[in-house]
Image (spheres, rainbow, N blue to C red):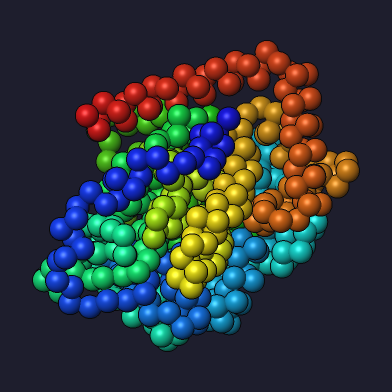
Amino acid sequence: MYIMVSLICQGFTGMNAALTGAASAATEPCTESCDVLVIGGGPGGSTISTLLAKRGWRVLMLERDRFPRFHIGESLLPANMPIFDEIDALEKLRRIGRLKLGADFPRDDGSYYTFKFDRALGSTPPYSFHVLRSEMDQMLFEHAREQGVDARQNAKVERVEFDADGVTVRVMENGASHAVRARYLVDASGRDTFLGKQLKLVERSAEHQSAALFAHYKDVDFNSGDPHGNIISVYRFEHGWAWFIPLPSGDMSIGCVCKPEYLKSRRGADNAEFMERTLALVPHALDRMTRAKRISEVRFTGNYSYVCKRMTGPRFVMIGDAWSFLDPIFSSGVFLSMHGARHAAEVVDGSLREPARERHLQRAYERRIRPGYARFAWFIYRFNSPVMKRLFANPRNVWRVEEGVVSMLAGDVFDDRRVLRRLTAFKLIYAIGALIDLRRWWSDLRERKRQNRAALKSTQVDAA
């Protein structure tokens, strides 16, 4: 089972010693102080900063880069929309976004099936948006500042040290290092996972080792059934999967997430050459690229999936990718980060007001967040299996299961019992399909496990 499920609700044994190991930090002179210090100014950091500032707390948010900056993950989920509305940023999002109404999963014959959000069983809105992340992230960062957050760019957190009364944070800002004293710390540092690395909490997923190449293109055709570019397309191919995301400008974000064994065939090729070679293997994708021209560099990122052994501790909470990163097949990243931020705000606010309730609030937060991640992970881990391919290519709405899957694709994986029951039914249908085609399922499972073991071993060797 996915690694996150095995990490539920571990105790705090040994954690306090790790957090209070540097007693000198508590007496180090600090040039400023705040109630909450947030590491990272992405969607999660901006969301929790805004929510806490609205409640009257002094919030300092530190982003190491300068906006606008490139970021992948341009497709949002409908479940995100109420959160944008809650922080009063939904109308700003509308102005910079391209309407998104569903997701295509092409079949082997070149046709495709579209899961439209207006068929969701739950209460999510029937739409979301495609965005240019450089624009959206900057908008959220500046919006947080407008709400009273002390939001700073080019401010790199170098280390954090905890003591019985709070947190001391060493910051490099404008070429000078200084210390900040905070009562609570939020790690929203994304895949940098600042606390995860400092406290040695990061564990790579043994079940899902992949890497991705991605770039932006112009003059890519939309699907024939999507003349206005309102649908994201997800293509499977032998060595992984690919995304086609229409951007607000009319350009297209294209990426390929590849299996470890295939990545070994790179053999010194540069990113652009390897991207072309990989796209040539994606069935029917090139049919949409006869006029296409690449307009950005090809970027590469590896070791996709990981989870930290903890998401909370005395005077800290981790949100979004700072705690765990999932393969982005279902465009869940921004939603999970902002959803986590929304509920982590309750932890921070309650802990500052009543410190004795901190552990109770943290446990409630963990009990909420972990199952939602695990539900996405279950689908992600099996996405390229033969059974899942058949179920997504020719869905049937028996017991309203298809509507439940649409709800999952919309991000509704936490609360709605109607949706959760249908997802359980889908798992049963999947198991029956696997039993019917047991030999093929077992062969596919063994091959995926072999590749992941090889990739994990390679990662450990590289780290050593």
Residue 206, image x, y percentages: 45, 29
Query: Residue at (23%, 49%) from the top-left corner?
Result: 21
Q: Please tell me which residue lies in front, 28 or 338.
A: 28
Q: Please tell me which residue lies in front, 332 or 310.
A: 310
Query: Can residue 456 be seen at all in this image of the molecule?
Result: yes
Residue 131, image x, y percentages: 51, 67
Residue 337, image x, y percentages: 50, 59
Query: Residue at (71%, 16%) from the top-left corner?
Result: 438
Which part of the image, by quadrant, shows the C terminus? Answer: top left
Report which quarter residue 167 is drawn in: bottom left
Q: Residue furthest right?
A: 399
Q: Is residue 452 left or right of residue 443?
A: left
Query: Can residue 265 be seen at all in this image of the molecule?
Result: no
Q: Please tell me which residue lies in front, 375 or 132.
A: 375
Q: Is residue 319 left or right of residue 156?
A: right
Report which quarter residue 83 is drawn in: bottom right
Q: Please tell me which residue lies in front, 268 or 350.
A: 350
Report which quarter residue 81 is drawn in: bottom right
Query: Residue at (84%, 41%) from the top-left corner?
Result: 396
Q: Is residue 383 left or right of residue 145?
A: right
Above/below status of 380 relative to 166: above
